[in-house]
């Protein structure tokens, strides 16, 4: 039985899946309590490059494993879980067995990709190159790691009232960066509003608490962060 173009496209897409899984695990390794990193878009050069590189690496590792099994006493196992099929048999029973084996092999390949992506992410973080994940705020999130710490955010909006700029302050619960790794959206909990007169420096705080507020980068003129740490007995 020969391959049809549509079937070839499905196979090509399936073989690319490990790269997507690996990229997901790669960025997942850098996730913190405050930040959930978005994956690079597949339409961007960076996204295509990362998915492609991880896909190739995952396939190389899995193909090496299959090759090692083929030259061992477990060669039959390697052949049974081989997703790299070039033809499918006409016999229905053999066809089902071949497809099942290919899907099982693809599942194993995806698990390898997840592990590979996670390890790569941990290595990048251990090398102190967190800027790849967090951009200019890498030092902030590294300093804010740990259950005893939290990040406090100050946001100056573009709104003014009688010459004073309106701002919000509160605990950062969600920090979503854009593709340029600068903050795209920030969510603050237990927030309060304040006003700041940029000419006199006079600052006024309001006691009313806002349980949660989300602000988009188009809404602010400036932002600042500070790391606080809980201390026993404090």
Image: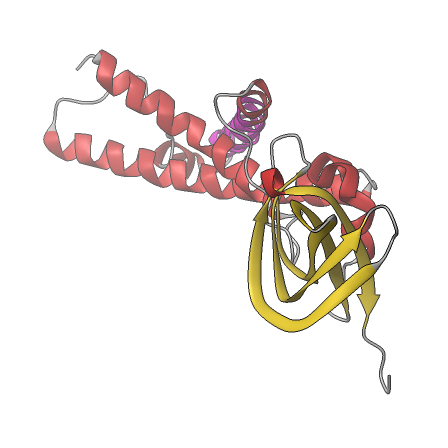
Q: Is residue 8 visible?
A: yes
Stretch of the chain drawn in magenta: 51-71
Q: Position of residue 200 (x, y in %)?
A: 88, 51
Q: Position of residue 91 (x, y in %)?
A: 12, 27
Based on the displayed image, in which of its 4 quarters is residue 39 positioned?
top right
Residues 51 and 206: in front is 206
Q: Please report the residue visible at 83 percent of the width from the left and 42 percent of the height from the top.
A: 128
Residues 35 and 80: in front is 35
Quadrant where the C terminus sits is bottom right
Determine whether 18 is above or below 156 in the image.
above
Horizontal side of residue 16 vs 37, given as left or right = left
Q: Is residue 26 visible?
A: no
Horizontal side of residue 110 vs 93, given as left or right = right
> By what rule are the colours in the image chosen?
secondary structure
The answer to whether residue 35 is magenta is: no
Q: Main secondary structure of the magenta part?
A: helix
Which residue in the rendered view is the most extreme toward the front?
162
Q: Please report the residue visible at 75 percent of the width from the left and 60 percent of the height from the top.
A: 151
Determine whether 9 is above or below 31 in the image.
above
Residues 221 and 21: in front is 221
Q: Position of residue 106 (x, y in %)?
A: 39, 36
Q: Please report the residue visible at 66 percent of the width from the left and 30 percent of the height from the top.
A: 180
The answer to whether residue 63 is magenta is: yes
Q: Position of residue 97 (x, y in %)?
A: 22, 36
Quadrant where the N terminus sits is top left
């Amino acid at each position: 039985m020969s391959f049809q173009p549509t079937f070839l496209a499905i196979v090509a897409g399936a073989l690319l899946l490990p790269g997507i899984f690996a990229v997901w695990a790669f960025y997942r390794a850098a996730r913190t309590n405050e930040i959930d990193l978005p994956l690079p878009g597949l339409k961007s050069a960076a996204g295509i490059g990362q998915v492609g590189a991880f896909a190739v690496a995952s396939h190389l590792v899995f193909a090496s494993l299959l090759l090692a099994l083929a030259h061992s006493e477990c060669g039959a196992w390697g052949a049974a879980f081989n997703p790299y099929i070039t033809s499918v048999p006409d016999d229905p029973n053999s066809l089902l067995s071949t497809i099942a084996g290919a899907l099982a092999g693809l599942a194993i390949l995806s698990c390898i990709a997840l592990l590979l992506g996670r390890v790569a992410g941990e290595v990048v973080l251990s090398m102190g190159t967190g800027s790849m994940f967090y951009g200019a705020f890498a030092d902030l999130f590294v300093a804010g790691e740990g259950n005893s710490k939290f990040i406090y955010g100050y946001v100056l909006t573009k709104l003014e009232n009688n010459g004073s700029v309106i701002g919000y302050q509160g605990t950062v619960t969600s920090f979503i960066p854009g593709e340029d790794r600068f903050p795209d959206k920030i969510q603050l909990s237990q927030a309060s509003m304040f006003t700041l007169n940029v000419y006199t420096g006079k600052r006024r705080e309001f006691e009313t608490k806002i349980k949660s507020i989300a602000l988009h980068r188009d809404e602010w003129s400036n932002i600042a962060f500070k790391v606080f740490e809980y201390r026993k007995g404090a």
